[in-house]
Image: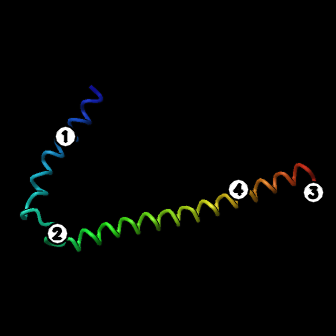
Amino acid sequence: MRLLAPIFVLATSLVLAAPALAGDNGEGLVGETDDRIVTFASLGVVVFFAAFVIVASAIMGRLDKRKDERKAVELRKRVGW
């Protein structure tokens, strides 16, 4: 029963949202969708994920550097140098 309740709520919300989103003859927020809009949206997705990977890698590299420095300090404390 615990599994059926969330599935029922999700299905109900999707069924009720579909007619609301299908208004205006299928036009979206920017008007009629043509090849140019689809191309720019796809390019935006590609650029977003490329930028996300670069930023996440930079953050991870900085965090790894801090971790390695902390480990080196602990090792120097243990060894006595």
**Real-space Cα distance between discs 2 and 3?**
67 Å
- The amino acid pointed to by label 3 is Trp
Please give the label number shown on residue 33: 2
Q: Which residue is mark 3?
A: 81
Q: Which corner quadrant holds the N terminus?
A: top left
Which numbered disc, 2 or 4, marks the residue that appears first in the sequence? 2
Q: Eyeballing the image, is 2 above or below 72? A: above
CA gap, disc 3 to disc 1?
64 Å
Q: Position of residue 80 (x, y in %)?
A: 93, 53
Q: Earlier in the sequence, mark 3 or mark 4?
A: 4
Picture coordinates of residue 11 (x, y %)? 19, 40
Instruction: From the image, state whether disc 2 or disc 3 is nearer to you.
Output: 2
Instruction: Give whichever of discs 1 and 2 has the lower sequence position.
Output: 1
Left/right of residue 2 with respect to residue 28 in the rendered view: right
Dots 2, 3 in contact, CB < 8 A: no
Numbered disc 1: secondary structure: helix
Pick the residue in front: 12 or 44.
Answer: 44
Residue type at the position of mark 1:
Ala
- Image location (x, y in percent) of residue 30: 18, 72
**Residue at the disc numbered 4:** 67
Do callouts 3 and 4 mark residues in contact (Cβ within 8 Å)?
no
| Circle 3 residues within 10 Å: few <14, some 14–19, many ≥20 | few
- Mark 3 and mark 1 in contact? Answer it, CB < 8 Å: no
Name the secondary structure under disc 3.
loop
Residue drawn at x 21%, y 39% as measured from the top left: 9
Q: Nearer the viewer, mark 1 or mark 2?
A: 2
Cβ atoms under marks 1 and 2 closer than 8 Å: no
- In which quadrant of the rendered image does the C terminus lie? bottom right
Q: Is residue 32 left or right of residue 1?
A: left
